[in-house]
Amino acid sequence: MKQFLLHINRHKTLFILIVFFTFLFFFRMHWPALGSWDEAWYGSIAREMVKSGDFMHSNWNGKPFYDHPPMGFWIMALTYDLFGISEFTTRLPSVLLGIGTIVIVYLTGILLFKKKVIGFAAALILGTSVWYVIRVRSGNLDSPFLFFYVLTIYSALKSAKNIRFFPLTGLAFGALMMTKTLVGASALPVIGVVMIPQLWKLKKNIWWLLIGIFGFLLVTIPWYVLHILSYPDFINHHFLEIGTRNKTAGSYFELNYVLPLFYLHMGVRKWYYLWSLSLVYLVFAFQFLKRNVFIIIFWNLVVLYPFLTTDQTHIWHLIPVYAPLALITAYGLWSIGSKVVEIVQKIPIPFIRKLMNMVNDKVITVFYIIAVLIIAGMQIKVFYPEVFPANRYISDEVDITQKAGRYDSTIFLDDDYLPMAVFYSGRFMRQMSYEPTQTRTLVNLFESKEKDFIVITRKFAINNLSEQNLEYRILEENNSFVILTRP
């Protein structure tokens, strides 16, 4: 017990971060129902893996799904297998990996800048960026993706000092590429820049480099080869339609930066201005000539730039930018503060000089931490009502689809929340807006030759059947929806 307490005391800064963000991310995390896009969608895919025992093929609502590789679904399926299927277990992997990302950012700040306070500030900046909190508390791919991204860069930094860490870099990069389609490829040039010191010793390090490459291939190749061989449209759909959004090479030179930067601002809020200030200072003070500063600025640029060349960017797409942004902001603010103290100390006024002589590194650290904590507190105060639900309730959509799951008939959905309906019913569903003409509307469905079906629809839609003198029977209903069938 004594040894444990000594260990906690030695790493109390990290311990404080873990305790704080564990509470922040878990608090009422399981209260809201899963969102149709993309939580319930991904949750249904993971559930199908558990039910079928097939972890190499992703399926959703009776169809193959290969928009994204399966790493995020594998992790979610593991929690389902261990703890059952619920909102809590759907979001549990994101929360745990979100806390893990906080830890790695903290360690990366220390590794790069040799100061715990910078690692602490960077972790706090990342963890109080509103859209990071929102996505960590949801069953999406963003949190696993960022975890493996930051782990890849951190292990590459460790490899630059000790090549024996490079196999971990290869495995982490492989897991990154198996989490989200092509987006993680931006880590490759960052790895290259970080690893330059070891690449100069290529002959000496060749075996460790080959082991790392082998680890990457071991994680990625089996799934990709299987899918290329299984689905004729896989390469076009997975790499071009989803991975690049059919962007041309020339489009990467056409800037559309207004909307992405607006989204970046909305995602990190007050940290955006301090990041901008820090970035400008580090460039104009020529601090980017330092290797550690150059690495985080390069990392930031490589991740951010593709989003500045498209009008299809969404606010959550920019979450991978948050990690280097947090490190730049943390180090930039420290550097600016230190520079201000240095300038003030040179003012030729005896009183000021005497006062500033009392300002040492410890005093600067205290003021720095207080400033960061104040801003972090302001962030949380502002986004608290946006992020944390005030009460727990079952929506009408969830209620009616749970009821629909009890029927053995073919289920039609006359609405647009298909992923949620599939997850909460546990059944295959046919969304009417995607159906052929003869079953695309409620009236068409009841006039069709379709047999043994039920349909979920809004209550007011019953009027359409009454107007056409079509008979129906109400099986279930709530405030907003009904389940209908033929008499």
Image (spheres, rainbow, N blue to C red):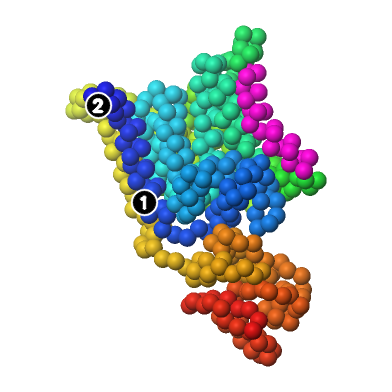
Please name the residue shown 74% across and 82% down the image. Answer: 447
Question: Is residue 221 a member of the stretch shown in magenta?
Answer: yes
Residue 16 left/right relative to 213: left
Mark with earlier residue (1, 2):
2
Would you identify the image quadrant in which residue 367 lies? top left
Q: Position of residue 419 (x, y in %)?
A: 59, 60
The residue labelled by disc 1 is 27
Q: Is residue 39 above or below residue 361?
A: below
Evaluate whether residue 154 shows in this view: yes
Q: Which residues are magenta?
A: 209-230
Identified by mark 1, the residue type is Phe
Q: Is residue 385 above or below residue 477?
A: above
Please name the residue shown 58% across and 54% down the image. Answer: 44
SS category of the residue bearing label 2: loop
Q: Is residue 435 above or below residue 241?
A: below
Please name the residue shown 66% across and 87% down the image. Answer: 471
